[in-house]
Amino acid sequence: MAVASNLDVQLVAATRFTPPTGVDWEPDEAATPVENVVEFAGRACYETFDRPNPHTAANDAYVHHIIEVGHDALLEHATATLYIRGLSRAAGNELLRHRHLSFSQLSQRYVPAAESEVVVPAAIEADPQLRDLFVRAVDETRFVYDELLNALEEDSAAEPNALLRRKKARQAARAILPNATETRFVVTGNYRAWREFIAARASEHADAEIRRLAVACLEILRETAPSLFDDFLVSELADGTKMATSPYVQ
């Protein structure tokens, strides 16, 4: 029977900062490494390491000014890597459109599927009858997948390489699997790319599943660099889901 998979997003890597020698500048102790990298990059452009403007002397004020004036290129010097599980392949295809991010995705060709893990759309999950229909359809699809897989492996029995034989069978049989099938990603991006992803996909107009992912990414990345994301306001929609918007994003 199909098993419902839940979204899980975890931070696995983020930029660290080592102040360079020979520069008369100390990082802001109240700032995170990511925020200090962004400030250092900006001050290096004009060698304003002495913080001549009192209004932007503190790191958070400096970073806020950068975002307000649209100097987003500085955000490209810091990166974060997230491990994402419990995302449907349909939403995964939407995620892959953000080409400034870098992806490593679960291989259906190599990894055997022990059971049908799927992401149930919220509109279907809310209705017991629709959910039952959905699960039955997934189970039927999985039955056909298993039948195809077994037949394809038998057809290629002459192939001496067992691993290659299984890969060839899976790559053909996977064509029948539904878009709801769970996929997993390791995603790396600089903070400018992450802001652009969140701005586009946390909108109320975005698909509900990828919007949920975007809000989850926002909440995690905000912990690594509060000043880079505190312009985003998270609010609840009428259906109980969340969205996020920023006055600095068109």
Image (cartoon, rainbow, N blue to C red):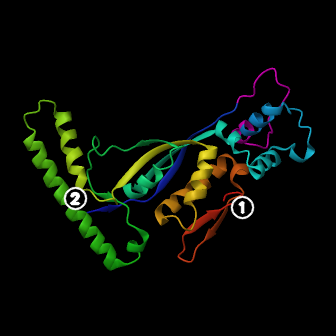
Where residue 118 appears, x then y in whole percent? Answer: 34, 60
Asked whether the beta carbons under mark 2 and mark 1 sit within 8 Å of each other, the answer is no
Residue drawn 12% across the image and 45% down it: 152
At label 1, the amino acid type is: Pro
- Viewer-side residue, 45 vs 169: 45
Q: Is residue 19 magenta?
A: yes
In this rendering, does residue 165 appear at all? yes
Q: Nearer the viewer, mark 2 or mark 1?
A: 1
Side (left or right) of 150 relative to 19: left
Q: Residues within 10 Å of mark 2 (few under 14, many from 20)?
A: many
Where residue 230 appears, x then y in whole percent? Answer: 71, 56
Q: Is residue 46 above or below residue 85?
A: above
Q: Place residue 71 in its image quadrant.
A: top right
At label 2, the amino acid type is: Arg
Q: Magenta region: which residues?
A: 18-37
Numbered mark located on residue 247 in the image: 1
Image quadrant for the N terminus?
A: bottom left
Q: Place residue 47 in its image quadrant.
A: top right
Q: Residues within 10 Å of mark 1 (few under 14, many from 20)?
A: few
Image quadrant for the C terminus?
A: bottom right
Q: Is residue 250 above or below residue 101?
A: below
In this rendering, does residue 86 appear at all? no
Where residue 193 appears, x then y in whole percent? Answer: 59, 46
Q: Which residue is mark 2?
A: 142
Side (left or right) of 235 relative to 205: right
Secondary structure at numbered mark 2: helix
Most extreme residue toward the top is 22
Residue drawn 62% across the image and 51% down it: 195
Q: Is residue 158 magenta?
A: no
In 3D space, how far apart are the residues under numbered discs 2 and 1 (Cα atoms)? Answer: 46 Å
Q: Earlier in the sequence, mark 2 or mark 1?
A: 2
Is the magenta region chiefly helix, strand or loop? loop
